Amino acid sequence: MKKNIIIALLALVALSCTNDLEELNVNKKDFAITTDASLFTNAQFKLFNHLTETSVNENIFRLIVQDWTETTYTDEANYDFKTRRIDETHWETLYRDVLKNFSESKSLVSGLPDVQTNKIATIELYEIYTYYVLVTSFGDVPYTEALDIDVLNPVFDTQEAIYADLLDRLDNNVISKFVPGEVGFSTSEDIVYNGDIDKWIKFANSLKLQMGMLLADSDPAKAQTVVSSAIAAGVFTSSSDDMKIAFETAAPYTNPIYAALVLSGRDDFVPTNTIVDMMGTLNDPRRDDYFTLLDDAYVGGVPGELNSFANFSHVSDKIGKDPTLEAPLMTYYEVEFLLAEAIERGFTAGDAETHYNSAVTASILYWGGTDTEASTYLAEAGVAYSTATGDYKQKIGTQKWLALYNRGFESWTEWRRLDYPVLVAPADAKTTNNLPPFRVTYPDVEFTLNETNLRAAISSIGGDELETKLFWDIN
């Protein structure tokens, strides 16, 4: 169902009026009252918008995982976070525009005489997800003191401690607190699930599954406990459970991809030969959903090189020219891939191939394909679970990377975790190990604002480098 962001955001505040003479000193055009719902809706939009963004000033994860490469510039496709202060934008958007608004919204809900448990649990779930993005981006980050206005120099909590606390919060403050059948945010305020608490519970369990699998290599015992608990409680079972929003036709609420590829009037991106060639080899039916044809062929640009826009395939009209294109943060096909992997690791019972096939099929259907196309594709020797190259990590990792096209951050996290497909850094990359980055570097502004605590964090994680692996990424 299409979510109306404009209506939700126009309802951000309530205006007040009085008959008092003090009214003469009040700017009637200014907002007088900010509500918990207004802050909640705004924070939701900021989170989705940021992770969907493709401006080279804000989000370059599609370039990192070699979905796309550049035509006008080459710095960002070579993993330059510093020239445009992309690391700072990632940091500030998540802390200032997302977490701060969620925190203020939760404070307002908590102050109401009839505290609504479902509202608080929903906000808490969003906070957990946002910190999950931060800690899997940077490593150690401010957490316990992050939003305390009385603390000018917050400490950086260790990534391990943050992650453990996020899992505890997910169990104790979210999953156990949701009350099915009772109200939460209304249909207009909740731009994801329209106030359907059962859907939020499924997302909470699916996020728990995802977070548990992130620990699969670093702490298998903990991972199994988390994963089995999430599965037992109930994760996504169909695409109707997808955690997503749809954007609007009118700026500034269009999908930011549309803003970057159409409204800007610029031709800055083409798909890479990394993904175009692989999909061609596998006869992938999603090629026409992902790319345009160039003289009856799909032709990708070279990652990190200065590619001429006219000489390569482009981002498909389905992705680039639809202002209302939905943006997911988690989908049913991702959950099916996670279940296949969990079975292979012995975390749960079942048939890995069945879930792998369901994941691939769900992705093809998501993009408008058919069951017949999915069956034909799964019969390809390079795709079929019994014959595809490599172990389960390679099979699942490769197909998950293909399914997560246009989902830059999620694709990058799964590539780091599974190590497949093999991606080779461009010749002029900022990394020194011939691979894409393993993390985002800390913003330079933190050296000015919070140097002592930042340097402690750098020491803790093993260096503020693109090549520094985070605690869960041990292989």
Image: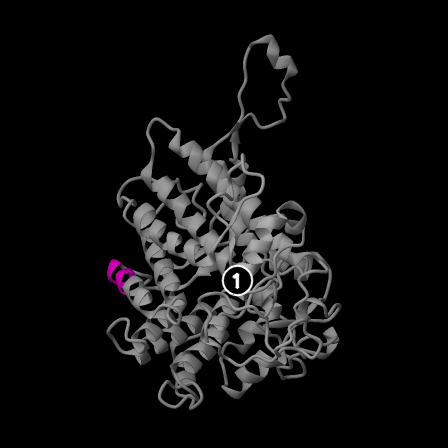
* Quadrant of res 118: top left
Which residue shows up at 48% across the image and 77% down it? 419
Q: Is residue 331 left or right of residue 92?
A: left
Can residue 382 be seen from the camera position used here? yes
Front residue (pair 405, 369): 405
Please name whichever residue, 17 or 444, is drawn nearer the observer in this view of the structure.
444
Quick check: is 301 in the magenta stretch? no
Q: Is residue 166 above or below residue 64?
A: above
* Mark 1 secondary-structure assignment: helix
Residue 284 at x, y percent in the picture:
49, 81
Magenta region, main secondary structure:
helix
Q: At label 1, which amino acid type do we have?
A: Ile
Count residues near mark 1 (Cα–Cα under 10 Å), then give few for <14, some for 14-19, many for 20+: some
Q: Is residue 249 visible?
A: no
Residue 312, compared with residue 77, is above or below; it is below
Residue on which the image places disc 1 = 461
Residue 83 placement: quadrant: bottom right
**Residue nearest the observer in this picture, 167 or 301:** 167
Position of residue 268 in the picture relative to residue 468 (left or right): right
Q: Which residues are magenta?
A: 228-233
| Image spot of residue 87 (x, y percent) | 63, 57
Quadrant in the rendering for residue 162: bottom left
